Amino acid sequence: MTPPLLRVEMFVVFLARGGALTHLAKEDGASWLATFAEPGHHPHAVVVETLERLGLTPRVVHSTSWRLEENQLLLTYMVAVRPMRLWPDALRPMVLHKPRQLTRGAATAPPEQLTNDDVLVHALRHLAWLYFDDAAVRRTLGHRWRAALRPYLPAPFMALAGRRARRRRAQTALASASPDGSPGQRSE
């Protein structure tokens, strides 16, 4: 059996005017694929070099998953780029709308079938998690990305994103409590 061909798959997004999260897709809607040209070449470098050859400026580059497909080992990257006025001819911006549910597999096995949309949603969830958890990513992308990525936060992280408001409510409740810790009495 021959070893699988190692390829890098890229999903490229940017924030369009008005704050719309936009996927920069190939004409046929497929993900971007790049093959390792040289042994030992790091996949991250392949992603950055591919984007730069197209005149794109990567802002965040993050590997999100891998899968074996038709004797190809695909290493998937989510890439946020700086918007441009004109995109290369082979690419078309597509506004992303409400995120859909992830396709799920078993506890010990991947889903039986994945579409590009499945992989894109999974990658966007990674980017959302990074934005809300990693100060360097948040600084790099800026505050405008917050609203665009919030719908992609995995459910447990959505709950954590609201922790500041809960903490303020708890502090207010503690401040109004009596010295023994019981709820304070309201004077009428």
Image: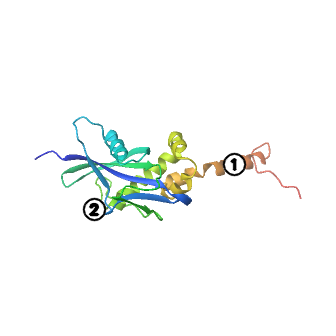
| Residue 33 visible, this angle | yes
Tell me the number on the disc at residue 179.
none
Q: Quadrant of residue 28?
A: bottom left
Its colouring scheme is rainbow
**What amino acid is labelled 1 in the image?**
Arg
Residue that appears at 27% across and 62% down: 113
Q: Considering depth in this image, is 181 or 58 the residue closer to the camera?
A: 58
Residue that appears at 56% across and 50% down: 160
In the picture provided, is 80 more to the left or to the right than 68? Answer: right
- Residue labelled with disc 2: 113
**What amino acid is labelled 2 in the image?**
Gln
Neighbour tally class for label 2: few under 14, some 14-19, many 20 plus, Cα within 10 Å: few
Q: CA distance from mark 2 to mark 1?
A: 44 Å
- Residue labelled with disc 1: 168
Q: Quadrant of residue 179?
A: top right
Foreground disc of the pair 2, 1: 2
Residue 155 image position (x, y, % from top left): 49, 56
Position of residue 177 relative to residue 26, above or below, is above
Residue 105 image position (x, y, % from top left): 32, 58
Quadrant of the image containing the C terminus: bottom right
Q: Considering depth in this image, is 85 or 82 the residue closer to the camera?
A: 85
- Spot the residue most to the top: 40
| Residue 103 visible, this angle | no
Question: How many dots with numbers?
Answer: 2
- Spot the residue most to the left: 1
Residue that appears at 35% across and 56% down: 119
Pick whichever of labels 2 and 1 is earlier in the sequence. Answer: 2
Residue 14 image position (x, y, % from top left): 46, 53
* Badge 2 element: loop
* Badge 1 element: helix
Q: Considering depth in this image, is 50 or 111 the residue closer to the camera?
A: 50
In the picture provided, is 183 more to the left or to the right than 6? Answer: right
